[in-house]
Image (cartoon, rainbow, N blue to C red):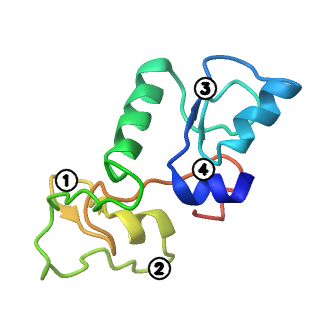
Amino acid sequence: MHAQGHKETFTLTYVTSRTVGIGACLARLGMRCIQRLDQPIILTVSDDLERVSSVLKRLSFVPPYSGGPRPQLTPLDPPDRPVKYLPENSCNPRAAICGASDGSRNWLGGIFDRDSFVETLEGWARTVVT
């Protein structure tokens, strides 16, 4: 029944403090959990405003009802743009995916559209990007 529920609806858990015991289990069942960085479980964001913004951003990708059409988001980058982030020595994988500033006002676009990639579990393994 648990797997079936995830196929039928979007689930997201918003945790305002520490979760232990059954609270931690219930938060994990939601598959997507937003919780403060200094609290245990899935560590993603640092304060309440950032957490609420994260919830709203994720909801913007969710259809209005199960099986409904996905929201059409207007990309910030034109579809035919080149990938401008080209590392000279070592590659920063986050910059290759998301793009980066060149130190001045120039934006070097990455593989994905600007501001469209949402990284999860960033603090867990610095060499792994998910």
**Residue named by callout 2:** 89
Q: Amino acid at mark 2?
A: Asn
Q: CA distance from mark 1 to mark 2?
A: 19 Å
Return the residue at label 1. Answer: 104
SS class of the residue under badge 4?
A: loop
Instruction: Name the element at disc 3.
Output: loop
Q: What's the residue at 67%, 17% (across, down)?
A: 17
- Pointer 4 residue: 122
Q: Which residue type carries mark 1?
A: Ser
Cα separation between marks 2 and 4: 23 Å
- Identity, as a three-letter code, of the amino acid under mark 4: Glu
| Lower sequence index among marks 2 and 3 | 3
Nearer the observer: mark 3 or 4; the answer is: 3
Q: Disc 3 designates what residue?
A: 36
Q: Please name whichever residue, 18 or 123, is drawn nearer the observer in this view of the structure.
A: 18
Q: Earlier in the sequence, mark 1 or mark 4?
A: 1
Q: Position of residue 38 (x, y in %)?
A: 68, 24
Pick the front one: 10 or 46: 10
